[in-house]
Image (tube, helix red, strand yellow):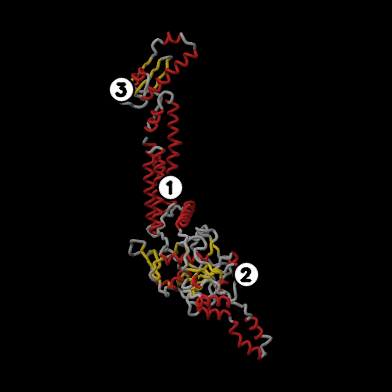
Amino acid sequence: MLQRQLLRYLLSLAVLTIFLLHTLDVLPLQFLKQMENVAYDLRVRITMPETLDPRIVIVDLDEKSLAKIGRWPWGRQHVARLVDYLFNYYQISVLGFDIVFAEPDESSGLKILDKLLQNELKENTLFKLLFAKIRPTLENDKIFASHLKDRAVILGYYFRSEAMSGSTSSGMLPEPILTLDEFEKSNIPFYEAREFGANLPDLQKAALNAGFFDSPAVGEDGVFRSAPLIQKYQKGLYQSLSLGIIRALLGDPPLTFGIVSTTDNPLETDYGLEWVGVGDYKIPVNEQAAVLVPYRGKQGSFPYVSAVDILEKKAPLTLLKDTIVLVGTSAPGLMDLRTTPVQSVYPGVEVHANIISGILDGKIHQKPGYSLGVDLLTLLFVGLTMTFLLPHLAPAWTTYVTVLFLFFLSWINLLFWKEFYLVITYSTPIILIFMMFLLHMSYGFFVESRGKRQLSRMFGQYIPSELVDEMNQSGKDFSIGGESREMSVLFSDVRGFTTISEGLNPEELTNLMNGFLTPMTHIIHAHRGTIDKYMGDAIMAFWGAPLDDPTHARNAVLAGLAMIDGHL
């Protein structure tokens, strides 16, 4: 018995060790990572509020607008008018662009006129005078820049984490929010960019600020679960679009950082980042300054207004007054659609809106540094408890205990998720529970039941099934070999059987014997007896073997009395 349980202990501990090594990232298992992503996405979907946030409005470069104004990019005069109407007519608070103005606007024909002035018409005095007069009205980028000046406008741009073959950075980056000198002792592993695609210098200088809208934190499966608030490029740190909009809304306060030491050795300089502070808001982030996107719901969690309705002043004033406005697109042709936990096709601009909304509400989930310790303790508790408990339980109780563990862990995990906005690993301990359950159930079926079947084949026709179960559970070895032991033996015989049998035909005699021997056998078995043999009308049975029975004499006498009475 001890050897059999020891094997189950060792197998269980081996499974637990694999799960612990995975959690410590010593032996990462891709399947468990994928299942954790599935569990995370499921929790997002079942707990998202699915309410509309009117504080953030998305001005959509949708199919309707593209059909009426023309394909993107539009002439800067249209975008300048859009900015004017949003601030002057609709009186919005902050405007963010989830697009980049990387190329000059040449739709006015200024480049052609400049070429004529330098060549064919360079001697034409009248042309020179007229061109000098109208030139300011044709410089669309400068006109657009003048409409950005002195307004709370945050432009968008993008970083690339890897330099692409034949590509170079373009445009002008904003000033970094901080330099690396303030973090040189912290070793915080910010996402590092190699190239960028930014806005034209005139536009960048005129805008209040800018923020990147790319997300190198996208999962291996291409799902947008998190996005960095800060990226590193060369010697500077740069803010994301959503962080830039929050800062603009609050009057551009400086950032603060929640940095904690990850080592107890004062001589070492390993630090971790827990939150980014802006004004009174503390935004929980991971060690790379990435925030988990707090999705409110599927597409449409924020009011959408067609860009052409702004240009034609058809949008309701009450919808936009004092709001944060993001200019982006839901048109498939403009390629700003993302895969998210809540929807497989989701506008990228609404990802930024969700982050801004979550920051304002203070409802962003976090996975703090101590979550690794929680994960390890959970696995140890589950693994060790089931390792040393399940081998002693019957299959039904094993099932009950497993269901209890599943329910308890699910309830605790969801409690932390909903009430404390803490992300605790869910799928790994759940899969461990299933693995332990399958291990012990299959071991019981394929190994222990095999032993029981062997005992049944050896003793089943002689002893009751209850004793076979006890023999199997005892873990001892049984054989049909001889052994010296004190036992009780019972002999029974039918009085006058010869006379009775002479008066019956064979069929009647067979029915008589079956009607007699069957209940007698049941009586013997009910009193823990073992049938040795049937001898015509006689039965020989014994007590005290193959299992030890300290009360074998009493059980034998009680069985004999019951046989005389003819009932159990």
* Cα gap from disc 2 to disc 3, whole angstroms: 99 Å
Residue type marked 2 = Ala
Name of the residue lying farthest toward the bottom: 125
Quarter where residue 143 is shown: bottom right
Q: Is residue 14 above or below residue 465?
A: below
Residue type marked 3 = Arg
Q: Is residue 399 above or below residue 307?
A: above
Q: Residue at x 56, y 71 (%)?
A: 307
Q: Earlier in the sequence, mark 1 or mark 3?
A: 1
- Under tag 2, what secondary structure? helix
Q: Quadrant of the N terminus?
A: top left
- Residue in the foreground of this view, choosing between 543 and 420: 420
Q: Nearer the viewer, mark 2 or mark 1?
A: 2
Q: Which numbered tag is attached to residue 387?
A: none
For the residues labelled 2 and 3, say whether their Cβ atoms are less than 8 Å apart: no
- Is residue 231 among the parts visible in the rendering? no
For the residues labelled 1 and 3, say whether their Cβ atoms are less than 8 Å apart: no
- Give percent across and percent down for residue 370: 37, 58
- Residue in the foreground of this view, choosing between 469 and 493: 493
Q: Which numbered tag is attached to residue 67?
A: 2
Q: Which residue is mark 1?
A: 432
Q: Which residue is mark 3?
A: 554
Q: Nearer the viewer, mark 2 or mark 3?
A: 2
